[in-house]
Amino acid sequence: AVESFRGAFGPMLYVRAGVQRVTGGVNPDGSLNELHIASEHNPRCTLQDAVDVLTDALLLAKCGVVLHAESNVTTAVALMAPNAEMLHIADVLGRGQPEGFTKVDLQRLYRVSQVCKGNRLLAQLEARERAQRERNRVV
């Protein structure tokens, strides 16, 4: 998935190297396949994994737009960054969370992220212009 997203998002995508990753989803016994919870499915879960999850959440909280799937980490990010635009990929793609992403899916996710980014920049410029007009009125 990383290479597919890198192909679609290019330099906008930041992927931390040297961290343990899991595919997510559900294990055969019905439990969630999560990286940050030690279980028989993930016996290698360490304190460093917890540090990595927190680091990822802090980095995501700095983003203006977060494209995400079901995740406790993105729920934490939404709480840490209440002004971030949180976009669930199922909502963007108009269907349930996919097992894999097609090229069309990735293009749609990229376009949506660009529109959101553009809308945020426009809102920032408009806020600056309003502030400047207000300062000019006061003087």
Image: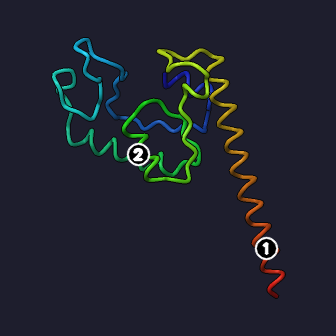
When asked about the image quadrant of residue 37, the answer is top left
Kind of residue sitting beneath label 1: Gln
Task: Say which element carries label 1.
Answer: helix
Label placed on residue 132:
1
Where 114 falls versus 135 (above or below)? Answer: above
x then y, percent, for residue 123: 73, 55
Taking 124 as reference, is 59 left or right? left
Identify the residue at image location x=34%, y=46%: 54
Where 97 falls versus 113 (above or below)? Answer: above
x then y, percent, for residue 134: 79, 77
Total marks shown come to 2
Label 1: few (<14), some (14–19) or many (≥20) C-alpha neighbours in 10 Å: few
Taking 122 as reference, is 20 left or right? left
Kind of residue sitting beneath label 2: Ala
- Quick one: quadrant of the C terminus? bottom right
When asked about the image quadrant of residue 135, the answer is bottom right
Q: Which residue is mark 2?
A: 57
When asked about the image quadrant of residue 44, the answer is top left
x then y, percent, for residue 114: 69, 38
Identify the residue at image location x=33%, y=42%: 52
Task: Say which element carries label 2.
Answer: helix
**Mark 1 near mark 2, Cβ–Cβ under 8 Å?**
no
The residue lying furthest to the top in this view is 28
Taking 47 as reference, is 13 left or right? right
x then y, percent, for residue 131: 75, 72
Most foreground residue, 107 or 134: 134
Identify the residue at image location x=53%, y=32%: 88
Of the numbered discs 1 and 2, the one sitting upstream in the chain is: 2
Where 77 falls versus 101 (above or below)? Answer: below
Label 2: few (<14), some (14–19) or many (≥20) C-alpha neighbours in 10 Å: many
